[in-house]
Amino acid sequence: MLKGKNILLGITGGIASYKIATLTRLLKKSRANIKVVMTPAAKEFITPLTLSTLSENPVYTEFANRQTSEWNSHVELGLWADIFVVAPATANTIAKMANGICDNLLLATYMSAKCPVFIAPAMDLDMFKHPTTAKNINTLKEFGYTIIDAVEGELASRLMGKGRMEEPEKISEIIHAFFISNQVLKNKKVLITAGPTHEQIDPVRFIGNNSSGKMGLALAKEAKKLGADVTLIIGPNKLEPQEDINWINVKSADEMYTQVHKNLKKADIIIMSAAVADFKPKNSSSQKIKKSNTNLIIELEPTKDILKSVGLIKTKNQLLVGFALESENELKNAKDKLKTKNLDLIILNSLNDQGAGFEFDTNKISIIDKKNKVDNFELKSKSEVATDIFNKIVSLQK
Ligand code: CTP
């Protein structure tokens, strides 16, 4: 159920920490990827070794790993996580979270995480009742975080009252419910093209470009996160194939065309992010062309426009998204492409934007819809760009 989901567990210094071993086991059984970040105080209650063994990942407690002299990046941890669950959350950590105090790795990760955050308070009843705790918890709710409310029962002090951390089984259920409610593309099939195409001149030379396929992969991962069945048709690339994505490697525009049309009928959403070569050699030489051939002229012919061919036959239930990479008259050209290729959305990349384009991990886009509404976005990581694109797609599905 949680296969491929990245869950970051944040443990603070409360006795309920020992229960996170059970939570880790439950989430691992559901096939989630687990990483753990602990405050220094949490190590008094449960060892990092226990949690690294159960999570099958290193546990992060300090900003720097003193043995390897490596930096534990709170930013990377925050970006890795699909959700961040702080459990148990002590009164002290809750107060710091509510007030922006950032004196350990867990708090720095919390402040840089952009994913949903779940907080499970755990403390003695009077601490829980204290007006500052109530106020801080309210502040966290107002920030948009989810509080997994503490429950009544016997506390470590042997007193009875509210302050016990919710049981790991219940926390696991809440996490499952969150991912189920997020599966807005469940039962939908998403077809994505990505990467460059290589048009062979001879057995060793080709016409191509520097597209990395990273934007297409980020789109595929986002679609997967939303519960879709995903097919990625991708040109030559250096990416790691993902086992939960139907990954189809192709080389040339012709091969991409064939695979797209083979998979088109059943697709509900089609996104063409590939940087398809626009031209191919009219005749590809079966032997390596010798350099003695001093006055070489390679005659080119256009490749098939895959996006246009899909636009011509798409049904009214299929949503078609194209990309446009432009260097001048960006908006006008993109709007024209939207119309001539019969698209529902076009994603405009400008070659004039720093940090946007082929080999970067970031991208800066505008999304244009059929009503000519333009949404402009900041420079973001490609996975955040993928989220923006799917937010728009999902809004059109309603
Ligand atoms: N595309 C395609 N097949 C091609 C060329 C492009 O499917 N043979 C798709 C791309 O995947 C992208 C969109 O068309 O989604 C726009 O590509 P782009 O290169 O910006 O535009 P072109 O239509 O090729 O026009 P031009 O190069 O003249 O701007």
Image (cartoon, rainbow, N blue to C red):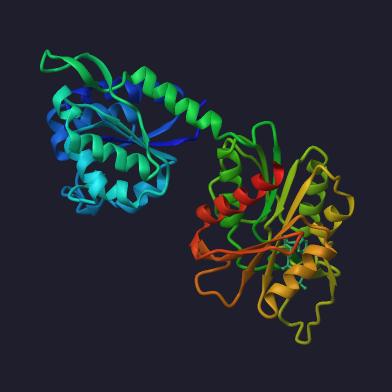
Along the viewing direction, whichever of 251 and 311 lies nearer the viewer: 311
> Looking at the image, which residue is at 79% across and 37% down?
266
Q: Is residue 159 above or below residue 188?
A: above
Residue 362 x/y as whole percent:
50, 62
Residue 283 x/y as whole percent:
85, 68
Along the viewing direction, whichever of 283 and 286 lies nearer the viewer: 283
- Left/right of residue 338 with respect to residue 30 in the rendered view: right
> Looking at the image, which residue is at 26% across and 45% down?
98
Residue 326 in sight from this viewpoint: yes
Residue 280 x/y as whole percent:
80, 68
- Left/right of residue 324 with respect to residue 223 in the rendered view: right
Q: Is residue 257 above or below residue 83?
A: below
Q: Residue furthest front?
A: 131
> Looking at the image, which residue is at 76% across and 60% down?
371
- Left/right of residue 101 with respect to residue 120 in the rendered view: left
Q: Quadrant of residue 195?
A: bottom right
Q: Quadrant of residue 157?
A: top left
